[in-house]
Image (cartoon, rainbow, N blue to C red):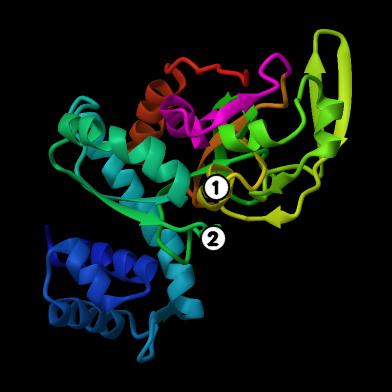
Amino acid sequence: MNDRLQSLVVFRRAARCGSFSQAARELGLAQSSVSRIIAELERDLGASLLARTTRAVTLTEAGADYLARVETILDALDEADHLVRGGGALKGLLRVGLSSSFGVREVVPRLADFLEQHPELRVDVVVSDLRQDLVSEGIDIAFRLGTMPDSTVLARRLGEAPRILAAAPRYLQAHAPISAPEDLRAHSLIVGPGALPPTLEFRQGDRRVSVRAEGRVTCAANEGATALARAGLGITVSSIWGLSQELDAGALVQVLADWTLPAVELHAVFPPGRAPGPASRAFADYFAASIMKRPHRQSSAA
């Protein structure tokens, strides 16, 4: 890699990580080398690109403008390299944003097979239940559940999965039977995560029933809501992705399996202002095929 190209790669990684030390780890360089390369680039350009503090590295106005142009060049170079290699092996670093529940349950178990197909690709997994800022956190691709609001991010719909209700056997044994959506009004729903609408819209053939989602316990994270349901504190509502392990183990039982709720959409999202790189596209393709081909399990309360 020539000096200018290396300086651009280092600058992009430092800008997107917000940290010289993190950029150094990801690029396999010493932190002092990253600092020196950035300083030399700024000296050559006659402009400050990154503002340094004891806590973080942030883009200056000139740095933000420069990064937007640099990323276009580097992305085009990555694309050209990928095409020359016949569209096969991927190289470099891919930074992936995941929620803790969906990421740990669905993505991590499939990651080894993807990396075996691309042995020269490195993946940095960023796990958070907070919605990540793709630009400031330097994330190349993230998975998000639910309907996408109007946004500046580039989103690709990968598929959908059923949204279901489930409860612990001991909860169902201790409370009134549930044979129709209207029966839920006498039960406690665990309200959450954030994708849950305030009113649940059930459908069975031509029948439509609306039930307000009310309960004594609220939790914004799927893992927390699932744990609360396992503890017998109520009925949780989630995608099959968020409950399949508990259903398979018998820790939770599906409620009203003969009624359907609106499905949960899965999207891959990419940073705005530039086309997804070959590694991001390949990652989305792989997980769309792998996750969506799995049959959705159905079980119901006795």
Q: State the quadrant of the C terminus.
A: top right
Q: Earlier in the sequence, mark 2 or mark 1?
A: 2
Closer to the camera in the image, 37 or 123: 123
Residue 75 spot, x, y in % from top left: 35, 48
Q: Residue, x 40% and y 39% (percent of image)? A: 105
* Mark 1, residue position: 231
Around disc 2, counting alpha carbons within 10 Å, would you say few (fewer than 14), some (14 to 19), or many (20 or more)?
Answer: few
Closer to the camera in the image, 50 or 27: 27
Q: Is residue 168 visible?
A: no
Query: Mark 1 is on which residue type?
Result: Ala
* Mark 2, residue position: 130
State how far apart marks 2 and 1 are (Cα). Answer: 25 Å
Residue 227 spot, x, y in % from top left: 52, 48
Res. 199 image quadrant: top right
Q: Nearer the viewer, mark 2 or mark 1?
A: 1
Q: Residue, x 33% and y 37% (percent of image)? A: 278
Around disc 1, counting alpha carbons within 10 Å, would you say few (fewer than 14), some (14 to 19), or many (20 or more)?
Answer: some
Q: Is residue 31 visible?
A: yes
Q: Which residues are magenta?
A: 239-259
Q: Residue, x 73% and y 35% (percent of image)? A: 175
Query: Mark 2 is on which residue type?
Result: Leu
SS type, badge 2: loop
Residue 302, above or below 78: above
Labels 2 & 1 near each other (Cβ < 8 A): no
Q: Quick one: which residue is furthest to the bottom in this view? A: 54
SS type, badge 1: loop
Residue 163 spot, x, y in % from top left: 64, 29
Residue 204, above or below 68: above
Residue 140, above or below 257: below
Closer to the camera in the image, 209 or 144: 209
